[in-house]
Structure formats: structure tokens, C-alpha cells
Amino acid sequence: MEQLRAHHVSEYPYHRSVGAVLGGFFSGLRDGRIEGVRGDGGAVIVPPTEYDPGSGRSTGEAVRVSDAGSVTTWCWVSHPLPHHLLDRPFAFALVKLDGADTALLHYVDAGSIEAMSTGMRVRAVWRSERHGSITDIAAFVPEGEAGSGFVPRNTAEVDDAEVAVSQIVTPIRLEYEVTAGHAQAAFLRGLLEGKFLGRRCPTCSKVYLPPRGACPTDGVPTTDLVECGQAGVVTTFCVVNVPFRGQAIELPYVCAQILVDGADIPFLALIQECPASEVRMGMRVEAVWQEPERRVPSLESLRYFRPSGEPDAPYDSFKAHL
């Protein structure tokens, strides 16, 4: 039987408030300068921190440093990935800028691994358009080559009236492959047929849905394949009112933990065909599936649950599953 594998990408833009210290650093990058802070013992820390890493005390005044420095250590990237800023081999390096006592991590565009060495002198190449991000420095290059490949921004273009940077957007991306084991593969193939297939623990008799290869309570392999029902009960739920990027469902909507008939563990699913204000603990619901030709071996085959019209389940019947 064909092994089931799935490619997963978890990606979102993380909006972060930076505060006064980092706000000054990012504002400086936007304006074409690099600033650190004076630490408790007098050392200049770049990038700046709000607290001295040695003493834990608050750091002091901002200190401008050079955009040139020396490589303290590095690693070579022969095959850049799609999210890297350079599309050719480069080095990730710690660069100790002149006037700083700590090193800054950034790209070094040296051209070849033979051109890289610890202690080599490099200089920042600034982007022509800058917005207050560490990527306003396009890369570091060996000193004397700062004109290669990038166009520096004319300092005359900087508007001194620009407000300080208070927030940055950090892209978060996790890409990975999942290979389904025996228990998970049976469950996923069951979804193609519009079935919920769980697994039973031979010791405690709990039915896990989605299934697990081993019972987390008893530590023994689950054995029997169990076909659970098409209906279930809402144990807990939340109403989503906050919009977000990529949102495809009209607000407000409900995500609920559904205890499917015949299972002993609830799982998360959408509730639709019902106003959010009417969803409640104990409400009986039924599965709504994609058309057979649109089903795939994933939970995308399950569209959502909707009210079944049955009387609510008594609290005592599901309280042990909250």
C-alpha cells in the first residue's frame, strides 16, 4: 500500500512592537546608520539590548558605530534557499563593527568560499529604499567592493522628520514533511470514504480519534480499528471574531472540540450552518463532508460539523472529556 506523505508549511507575518531601544536601532537602519547602546560596564552592544547581558541592569545611551568591521566567525551556504536574501552562495557571519564590542549576524557576499576568512574586513551595503529593518543592510561585502550589486541610498534623501520605528514585521515560516504511520494512514484513508476510523487501547479500552499508535496513558500499542459515528457532541468551543491575513471564513465563526460518538478523545473542527451565538456545550452535531471526488487523505475532506437537531447531551455524559 502506498505510503502517505504530506508537505506542510506553517507561515505567518509576526508583528512585533520593538520599544524605545530597538526602535532607535531600526530607525537608524532606515536612516543609514548603525547604533548600539552602552552597557553597564561601558561595552557597546550591537544590536542593542534593553538590559546588559552580564549584569542585568538597564543599558545606557545610544552609541553610533561604523558600518564596517571584521568577521569574527562564519559559515558558508553553498545552496541558498528560497527565503534567503541572496540567490547565490554566501556566508552567514558574525561581524564586529568598528566601535562595537559585540558582533552582528548578517550576510557576507564574498563571491566565493575562498574569499572568506576570519578577521577579514567587510563593509555594509545599504539598500536604496529602507523601511527600518535589519534587511535595510542588503549584505556585507569585502571592504573596497561596497558598490558591487547594490545601490546605496543618498543620505540627502533621508527625511529627518520621519517618526521612530515602533513596530516591525518578522516573517515566520516552518516547512516540513510528515509521513503517516500505520494508525494515522488508516485514519486518513478513512476520510476519503467519509469515515472516522479510530484505534482502541487494549488496556484501558479508550478509542483515540484521530488515532495514536500507542496509548499515552498505558504506553502500549493501540490495536483494534474502530469506526466511530458521524455525529458527536460539542464539549468546549471558542468564537473567532478577530480578522487575520488569509482568512477564508466569514466572521464570527466557531471552532469546537467535538467528541464523536464511539470516541473517547475530542478533536478540533469548525461549526457551521448555525449562528455563533447559538453554539453551546452539549450541542449535538453531525459531520458534513466534501463531495467524494473532492476528498483527499486529510481533514480537508471534512468540511465542518453542523447541528444535528438532536436534543443536547447532558453535561454528565461529556464532563470527563473537557
Image (tube, grey):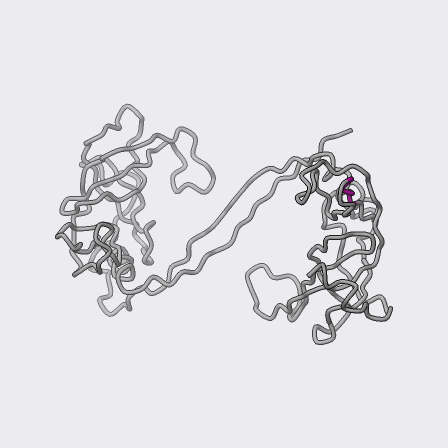
Residue 37: % across, % down = 19, 56
Residue at point 82% right, 40% down?
225
80 left or right of 165?
right
Residue at point 64% right, 61% down?
248
Tell me which corner region of the image, top left, top right, bottom left or bottom right, holds residue 92.
top left
- Quarter containing the N terminus: top right
Pick whichever, 210 or 277, lies toward us: 210
Bounds of the magenta span? 198-202
Residue 158: % across, % down = 24, 61
Q: Is residue 273 above or below residue 37?
A: below
Q: Is residue 200 magenta?
A: yes
Q: Is residue 80 above or below residue 227?
A: above
Q: Is residue 45 magenta?
A: no
- Quarter containing the C terminus: bottom right
218 left or right of 66?
right
- The outermost residue toward the top is 114
Residue 240: % across, % down = 62, 68
Pick whichever, 19 or 34, lies toward us: 19
Give the prevailing secondary structure in the magenta stretch: strand
Residue at point 70% right, 55% down?
267
Pick whichever, 306 or 64, lies toward us: 306
